[in-house]
Image (cartoon, rainbow, N blue to C red):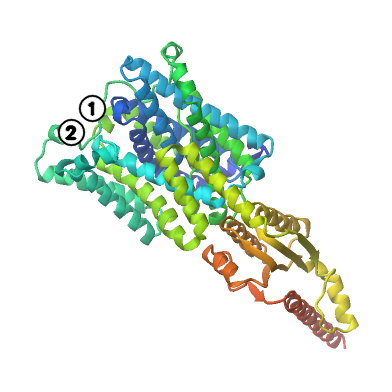
Amino acid sequence: MTPSESVSSPWTEELQPSHLIPSLMAGLVTGIIGVIRAISYAALIFSGLLAAYLNVGVGIAVYSTAAISVVVALTSSLPGMIATPLAAPTAVLAGLAAAIAQQLQGSPPEEVLATVIAAIALGSLCTGIFLFFLGKFQLGKVVSIIPFPVVGGFMAGTGWLLVRGAVQVMTDTSLSFSHLAYLVEADPLLHWGIGLGLGVILWGLSKRVKHYLVVPVSLLVAIASFYGVVFFTHTPLEVVHDQGWLLGPFPQGELWQPLTVSQLQSVNWWVIIQQSGTIATLMFISLLSLVLTNNGIELAVEKEVDVNSELQAVGLANIAAGVGSGMAGNQALPSTLLVHKMGANHRLAGVFKLIPCLAVLVLGSEFLAYFPKPLLGGLLLYLGIDLLVQWLYQAAFKLPLTDYLTVWLILVVINSVGFLQGVLVGLGMSVLLFVVNYSRVNVTKEEFSGAACQSDLERNPQQLQILQQSGNKIYVLQLHGFIFFGTANQLLGQVRDRITQLKPNSLQYIIIDFHLVSGIDSSAVLNFSKIKKLAEQNKITLVYIGITEKISQLLQRGEAINSSDIQFFKTLNEGLAWCENNILQHEEKRDNSALESHTRIKAKTH
């Protein structure tokens, strides 16, 4: 399905008040959140040697937020999908911009700025073309097979880079061992300490209060509190600015300043070519973010997302961003969930997100000069803390030791060497662990219906006939060997294909036999969670056979078997007998009901 074919919601329905008003409200809310994040991302990229060009960075980030959101809203396979620049690709862009600024230190300012903008735009264009053709050639299922520890290490590495960037934004000093003595002095400590407090509060509130307005309202309260302190202490804004609490100063001019033909002559293309590895990293990280976000959205909204369509949609969105000298982006899980919770899962929600973006671009740099740095730093810290807690603390209780150590290894390599090297090391470790585990077993797999295999319980001829005729109501999968992220993905595809091949509601039981399974890895748990969701959506009962205590713990931690509807048996014979008895009882009740109805009709005629 191409992006143009995915636009299935008629505009006549989109423009109905029942759709239009929720879409407008959701668009405004997600737009405000997107603008605040865009400013924080711009501050992350345009910091240090590039701090003087922050206004241009904000224009790039806000334009990108608008362009990516509109294109994905109109072309996604899921109405109500919200897209925006994300933390992980932004962290890569921050490294890219800092490296270029360092190489061009001492060069004319126009050359430095033009080269940085060109590199950001080129990264978006390359990412867009890469993702679009992956989707065009239907490679979505292939690229979605990414080992779970690699995802975890990538996300943890992103979290730590966000923490480092937040400190840089709030203190104009990088977080490193050589600067620790300065960062604990009274003045810088106060600056980053307030941001840290705000980040922790945002993280705590978001975990305790499950409401889509928690973060935006908290940010507004933080701004009001900041200026409340300024007002009651009678501190002039000039002093507040001189003490480094506010953004700026900014040069005059529009925020969004895309590259012109004349500026292209100032671009140092050789420096950009030297950063081709970082641009390749951006492309891979964007792909990784898309796959991870798609998985999260599917589980959260309980709808299947066409990954090939999403690759094309996000590809087109990044091309649109790159043409306007913008930065790369992707689907946003929190904002997409927010839209669906507001009952505004319509395409216009993403289009209306354009309104706050345009407002900021029109207001210009004078508006930005009043933005408190601790607010931006606190937002970046909130995003970073959330990732670190999820992948360094919570993962310790969910992942096997080898997978957890792989996450830490990737984190260390990312922050000491680079993103691409960290991901490659993680892939190498995952392949090594897989080879070690897989070499111990012989992986085979069988599948059959209830008509091909029945329990050994004695049945009368009528019951045997009923079970033979109802054989398609039972689907048996016998698993063998070690189940990893690849085979688990194939298993999910088999279950999905079986459901779609049969008539609706004709499949009632799926039996998954684990008695010959030697183990599963953490990546496979996600697919079993998807199988559970798929069964719930189609009112199918899952029956698990012969699950060991170790496998049960992994599935329980991954919330793949936390349902009262799932049945567990020690042997396949017991599971088949239970399903067969339910089918026979249902047929018996239906026959009795039909007999009673026939008796009543006959009595009335007499």
Q: Secondary structure at mark 1?
A: loop
Q: Percent from the top left, x then y, of residue 292? A: 54, 47
Q: CA distance from mark 1 to mark 2?
A: 9 Å
Amino acid on which disc 1 is placed = Pro
Looking at the image, which is closer to me, 358 or 572?
572
Q: Residue at image x 50%, y 29%? A: 277
Residue 473 appears left or right of 525: right
Q: Percent from the top left, x then y, of residue 145? A: 62, 47
Amino acid on which disc 2 is placed = His
Q: Quadrant of residue 479?
A: bottom right
Q: Is residue 55 above or below residue 269?
A: below
Does the rendering let one see residue 339? no
Q: Is residue 219 above or below residue 261?
A: below
Label 2 neighbourhood size at 10 Å, few (<14), some (14-19), many (20+)? some
Q: Residue at image x 44%, y 37%? A: 418
Q: Percent from the top left, x then y, of residue 94? A: 39, 33
Looking at the image, which is closer to me, 590 or 493?
493
Residue 44 appears left or right of 284: left
Q: Percent from the top left, x then y, of residue 289? A: 52, 43
Q: Is residue 304 above or below residue 463?
A: above
Q: Quadrant of residue 540?
A: bottom right
Mark 1 and mark 2 residues within 8 Å of each other at the beta carbon: yes
Q: Which mark is residue 249?
A: 1
Q: Which mark is residue 241?
A: 2
Label 1 neighbourhood size at 10 Å, few (<14), some (14-19), many (20+)? some
* Sequence-first disc among 1 and 2: 2
Q: Quadrant of residue 55?
A: top left
* Image quadrant occupied by the N terminus: top right
Looking at the image, which is closer to me, 122 or 470?
122
Q: Secondary structure at mark 2?
A: helix
* Image quadrant occupied by the C terminus: bottom right
